[in-house]
Image (spheres, rainbow, N blue to C red):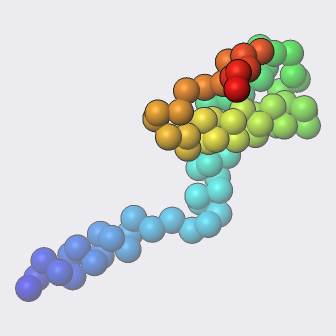
Amino acid sequence: MRIIPIIAALTLSACATPEQRAEEMASYITDSYGPTCTKLGYATGSDNHRNCMVSMYQADQVRNSMPWHTPPPIPGYRIRR
C-alpha cells in the first residue's frame, strides 16, 4: 500500500504548466527549424524568420499525420480518369 502514494507523487511531479509546455515547444521549434530558416536567408529574430519556423513545423505536423499508405503528392502528376 505504500507504493500508491509514491506513484501519485511521481505522477504529479511530472506535470508541467501551460507556460512550461509553451516554452518547451518554442525551444523545440527554434532548435529544429531555426538553422534551416537562417540558411534560407531569413534574419534571425525577424518576423519572417519566425513565420518560416512555424510554417515548417506545421508542414511537418501535417506530413506526420498522414496515413502511412498515402504517398506524397508528385508535383505535376495527374491521375487520368
Where's residue 17, x and y in %?
A: 57, 68
Q: Residue at x 10, y 82 (%)?
A: 2
Query: In the drawing, does residue 25 fall left or right of residue 55?
Result: left
Nearest to the observer: residue 81 or residue 39: 81
Count of picture labels: 0
Residue 57 in view of the camera = no
Nearest to the observer: residue 80 or residue 77: 80
Residue 54 appears in which quarter of the rendering?
A: top right
Residue at the far right in the pictured view: 47
Q: Where, quadrant-wise, is the C terminus in this rendering? A: top right
Residue 52 in view of the camera = yes
Q: Residue at x 64, y 41 (%)?
A: 62
Query: In the drawing, does residue 12 fall left or right of residue 45?
Result: left
Using the image, determine if residue 52 lies above or below residue 41.
below
Q: Residue at x 53, y 33 (%)?
A: 70
Where's residue 24, x and y in %?
A: 59, 49
Residue at the far front in the pictured view: 81
Where's residue 41, x and y in %?
A: 86, 15
Residue at the far bottom in the pictured view: 1
Q: Residue at x 72, y 32 (%)?
A: 56
Using the image, determine if residue 48 lies above or below residue 4.
above
Q: Where, quadrant-wise, is the N terminus in this rendering? A: bottom left
Query: In the drawing, does residue 27 fall left or right of residue 78?
Result: left
Residue 9 appears in which quarter of the rendering?
A: bottom left
Using the image, determine if residue 28 lies above or below residue 80.
below
